[in-house]
Every structure is written in C-alpha cells, then in structure tokens.
Image (tube, rainbow, N blue to C red):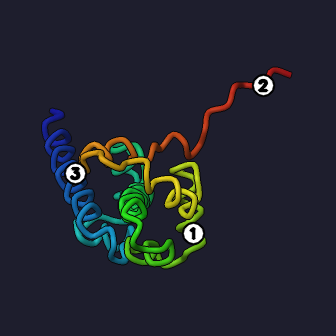
Amino acid sequence: MSSRPASEQHLRDLALLRRVRDRIDREYARPLDVEALARGVNMSAGHLSRQFRLAYGESPYSYLMTRRIERAMALLRRGDMNVTEVCFAVGCSSLGSFSTRFTELVGVPPSTYRRQAANATAGMPPCVAKQVTRPVRNREAPATEPQLA
C-alpha cells in the first residue's frame, strides 16, 4: 500500500482548513461557532477542531477570538467607540467574556488599553501600528519555572 492517498487527503484537509481560517478572518464579527464552520466544509466539529489545532496550533474558537481581539484593539486605538460598542462590533455577545479574553491576550483590560493606546501609536503608519500592537498568544498562559520540592 502507498501513502499517496493519505497524503492527498491531507492536502485536501489543509485546503479545507485554509477555507475555514479565511472564513473566520472575513466573518469574525458574525456569530460563528465550530459546528457552523465544520458544516461549511463537510466535516464533523470534532474532526475540524482536531485538524485545525494540528495545522495552526490553536482551536478554531481560539483563533476566532484572537481575530476579534485584534480588531477590537484597532477600534479602541481609534478612540471613537467605547468598550461596549467595540465588544458588539467585533461579534462578541458578552461584555464580561470579551473583557476577560481581551485581558488574557493583551495583558490589560480593554478600558485601560483604550486610555493607553490613544497616544501610543500616534504618528505611526497603520500597518506598523497593527504589527506592533498585535496580541501575543503566549501572554495567555505565561510559562512558570518548575518548582522543585
């Protein structure tokens, strides 16, 4: 038996996963859940989650929330919307969950970020501001040194 059919299936799965990722990037502000994303590519939700994590290092939901937080950061830097308006504009339905996730990824609550970011990127080209202010996933779960007993 050859591994060719398996590698062809793997390439097809990767193409489907790219479609899912692209859909998340485009439709982050819409209500999206793993089941709906999986239906869009004719996969089960469990299979999509496992394959997405293998390909991209995080679950589809985590990727979606990172996109939403990135967009929220941009809107908060503009300064013309309050935190609640930004929360709903990026597709979150709970201010509490939005604030918690924002704080996990960015390191400060959205209201603090809004105050601090107003002048932080002044005069910076938008493409550079986006790169400099992108949330860093490893802030979510900081590594701790092993404790020796």
Q: Secondary structure at mark 3?
A: helix
In this picture, residue 28 sits left or right of residue 66: left
Tell me if residue 10 comes above or below residue 95 in the rendering.
Answer: above
Label placed on residue 147: 2
Q: Amino acid at mark 3?
A: Asp
| Disc 3/disc 2 C-alpha distance (Å) | 41 Å
Label placed on residue 85: none
Q: Residues within 10 Å of mark 2 (few under 14, many from 20)?
A: few
Q: Sequence order check: which comes first, mark 2 or mark 1?
A: 1
Q: Secondary structure at mark 1?
A: helix
Q: Residues within 10 Å of mark 1 (few under 14, many from 20)?
A: few
In this picture, residue 69 sits left or right of residue 112: left
Residue 65, horizontal then vertical, whole percent: 43, 61
Nearest the eye: 23 or 109: 109
Q: Which residue is mark 3?
A: 13
Q: Sequence order check: which comes first, mark 3 or mark 2?
A: 3
| Disc 3/disc 1 C-alpha distance (Å) | 31 Å
Tell me if residue 9 comes above or below residue 146 in the rendering.
Answer: below
Q: Residue visible at 33% across and 73% down? A: 29
Tell me whether circle 2 and circle 1 mark residues in contact (CB < 8 Å): no
Q: Which residue is mark 1?
A: 97
Residue 147, horizontal then vertical, whole percent: 78, 25
Q: Residues within 10 Å of mark 3 (few under 14, many from 20)?
A: some
Residue 45, horizontal then vertical, whole percent: 38, 65
Q: How many numbered discs, if any?
A: 3
In this picture, residue 74 sits left or right of residue 107: left
Nearest the eye: 81 or 56: 81
Q: Amino acid at mark 1?
A: Ser
Asked where in the image residue 11 lies, by quadrant, the reply is top left
